[in-house]
Amino acid sequence: MLSIRGVATGYGKVQILRGIDMSVSEGQIVALLGGNGTGKSTLLKAISGLLPVWDGAIEFEGEPIQNRRPNEIVKRGLTQVTQGKDMYPAMSVEENLRIGAYTRRDRAGVTADIGKVFDYFPVLGERRRQLAATLSGGEVQMLVIGRGLMARPKLIMLDEPSSALAPRIVLDIFSIVNRISRNEGITILLVEQNVRMALLLAEYGYVIRDGVIHIEGDSRDLITDDNVRLAYLGGTVTDAGADAGTGLAH
Ligand SMILES: Nc1ncnc2c1ncn2[C@@H]1O[C@H](COP(=O)(O)OP(=O)(O)O)[C@@H](O)[C@H]1O
Ligand SMILES: [Mg+2]
């Protein structure tokens, strides 16, 4: 569904990505992992058309999309939820959701989809008329995911949804994301520094380092991979059993 071949980009003269190869199949949840500053958000910006691609190719549903306009890419069904929990604090929860539907003209469909977001995230429904500024960190993360869904994406890219949230809240959000993916048939590219959490949700993972994909594999294999463990999981033997019962097992 999404194919990235030899993608290079950066800022000004500074090259960050040196030839990224990865692919995401329809219906999959795939994690893009890596330490702080390794270029994960940079890759998402390049995919979304927010940063020029210097070299390589990006295809979405078999069509090249590199260096297309961001809003054309959104219309094709590829939406990014940017890092940092961006929302409009002085607007209500519902108004924030409507902004996510800016490329759509089907008013009835937009209203129906707002109802659907409230079904998945009931707390947003309870707070629909409240200003976004009054939400907790977890609720804001739900709001920005909900806003991403309002574009009716086929593939949604989530940039570090776990950041600054307590593990319990991350698990709640991830299990809802998992349900949304399965029920709505939405493919997910999940960017995370929190490798352990990400591999609970994703079935496949890529680890970025030095501008290239350094390791890739099934989540089960990555979580027991010595290199991944040493670099990203604190070097301890992971206790996969402790994660049972979260509803995220795959
Ligand atoms: N707008 C920018 N201008 C210049 N350099 C940037 C900009 N955004 C990010 N960088 C640099 O690019 C590198 C990768 O950043 P980023 O993609 O945000 O990493 P990650 O998302 O993996 O934490 C970092 O060295 C960062 O300082
Ligand atoms: Mg980032």
Image: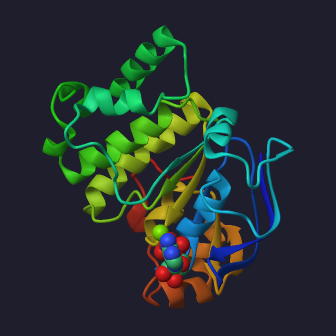
Q: Is residue 157 above or below residue 101?
A: below
* Image location (x, y in percent) of residue 153: 59, 35
Q: Is residue 221 visible?
A: yes
Number of numbered tags placed on the structure image:
0
Residue at 37% x, 31% y is 97
Outermost front residue = 12
Front residue of 90/6: it is 90
Outermost top residue = 108
Q: Is residue 120 visible?
A: no
Residue at 30% x, 28% y is 95
Residue at 47% x, 85% y is 237
Viewed as shown, does residue 114 lie left or right of 139? Answer: right
Viewed as shown, does residue 112 lie left or right of 134? Answer: right
* Image location (x, y in percent) of residue 247: 44, 47
Viewed as shown, does residue 240 lie left or right of 140? Answer: right
Q: Is residue 230 above or below residue 64?
A: below
Q: Quadrant of the N terminus?
A: top right
Front residue of 178/41: it is 41
Front residue of 99/154: it is 99
Q: Is residue 168 above or below residue 25?
A: below
* Residue 135: quarter of image: top left
* Image location (x, y in percent) of residue 141: 33, 49
Q: How is the image coloured?
A: rainbow
* Residue 34: quarter of image: bottom right
Outermost right residue = 62
Q: Is residue 45 above or below residue 248?
A: below
Residue at 17% x, 44% y is 133
* Residue 55: quarter of image: bottom right
